[in-house]
Image (cartoon, rainbow, N blue to C red):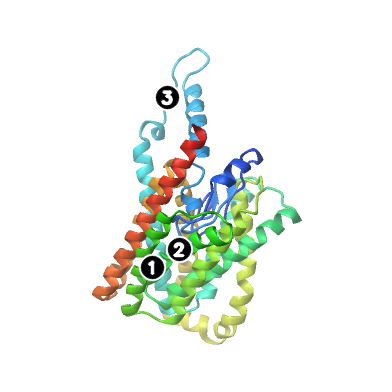
Amino acid sequence: MAAARTLLPVGGAAAVAVPRRLRSRETSSTSLGGPVSDGARLVRRMQLRPAPLLGSSTCALPSLLGRRLIRTQAASSSSSSDSTGEAKPVGFAERYPALVTGFFFFMWYFLNVIFNILNKKIFDYFPYPYFVSVSHLLVGVLYCLVGWSFGLPKRAPINSTVLKLLFPVAVCHAIGHVTSTVSFAAVAVSFAHTIKALEPFFNAAASQFILGQQVPLTLWLSLAPVVIGVSMASLTELSFNWTGFVNAMISNISFTLRSVYSKKAMTDMDSTNLYAYISIIALLVCIPPAIIIEGPQLVQHGFKDAIAKVGLAKLVSNLLVVGLFYHLYNQVATNTLERVTPLTHAVGNVLKRVFVIGFSIIAFGNKITTQTGIGTCIAIAGVALYSYIKAKIEEEKTQMKSA
């Protein structure tokens, strides 16, 4: 499911609950501020986690991951021999773990790039980002409902207490997703992703001033090139408009607030069910503004114009395919995170953004100024530096606690 132990994607992204015996240990070592997959990116292990560009998403739970690895290795060792002590056949994943991990990275990048390209192309003949956002979530919800109908997984019961915990998380997820989509529709994909590179700055600010967690000076300094780079790129971006810029910034703030509420929403529900419920709530939140803002235009001429340009079958199929890619890239991002260290995933996430920006420029033939290109490179380099420092700090904390 999308964003399982990730990433609440477009970013892209929900979260999971940590077993109660781990909460006290977990809370002290988790802080905001390193990049994760966009949209992605929301459900994380057994604790409700923020999506895109969060240190807690990419760098937290290393000790828990280590224990999970030990349990996995022990289980693998015990299952590799039968009661007579004879070795059992080893599967492909166990024999070639590097190849499997490489495949996950490839699919993560591939699905994310394809989603961004197809999603942008839809706006050429269907410029209604609020409705498109609803279609993304609707496809994900249908995916979850089909899984429940087959018992994959079995649907977990939910009560009013859990709903109250999940509601603010889902609302922030909905706002972040919609504003991201509006930004992608208004400006070039490459520029929208450059603006979204500022998410670590907002996450660090929330960690410092809202959660009261001290952010090291080195992390603040590593954010300077991010701010400078985005500013340089914005000043000479050919596709710049305030609608795209402001909505991308609102998306950054929304995903940051989602991470704050995620820390308060603890539940023992598994990640797949949890993300399904968050997607359902987010869908219900997104429908009213879509109807109010774009409903009259869609009824009068929106659907009619789109059908006249590409046909009903292509319009529906494109919306379904893009929604599926949105859901799957968040899911694969989560699966990838489960296979590698937080530092590796953080670096991989930065490279993913580089791939998206690069391929979007090639796919759409976007013209960029020299200053915009330099600013984008500086911003991405700053995110990479921030991710590396954040991951190393979290690893050192984990090693000190385990020592």
Q: Are marks 1 and 2 in contact (CB under 8 Å)?
A: yes
Q: Which mark is residue 276?
A: none
Upstream in sequence: badge 3 or badge 2: 3
Residue 288 position (above or below residue 89): below
Which of the pair 118/48 is nearer the observer?
48
Name the residue carrying label 1.
227
Residue 214 left/right relative to 264: left
**Location of residue 135 in the rendering, given as x and y in whole percent from the top left corner:** 54, 68
**Which amino acid type corresponds to the residue marked 2 in the rendered image?**
Phe
Disc 3: CA contacts within 10 A as few (<14), some (14-19) or many (>=20): few
- Identity of the residue drawn at 45% across and 53% down: 216
Q: Please identify the quarter of the rendering in which residue 92 is found.
A: top left
Residue 237 position within the rendered picture, expressed as x and y whole percent measured from the top left: 33, 77
Q: Are marks 3 and 1 in contact (CB under 8 Å)?
A: no
State the residue at coordinates (41%, 32%).
94
Q: Residue at x 47, y 67 (%)?
A: 317
Q: CA distance from mark 1 to mark 2?
A: 8 Å
Q: Amino acid at mark 3?
A: Pro
Residue 181 visible from this viewpoint: no
Report the Cα–Cα distance between label 3 and label 1: 53 Å
Number of other residues with Cα within 10 Å of mark 1, as a class: few under 14, some 14 to 19, many 20 or more: some
Which amino acid type corresponds to the residue marked 1 in the rendered image? Val
**Residue 89, label in figure:** 3
Q: Is residue 167 visible?
A: yes
Query: Cα distance, mark 3 to mark 2?
Result: 49 Å
Outermost residue on the front side: it is: 217
Q: Mark 2 packing: few (<14 Cα in 10 Å), some, or many (20+)?
A: many
Q: Which mark is residue 201?
A: 2
Q: Position of residue 158 (x, y in %)?
A: 72, 52
Give the mark nearer the N terminus: 3 vs 1: 3
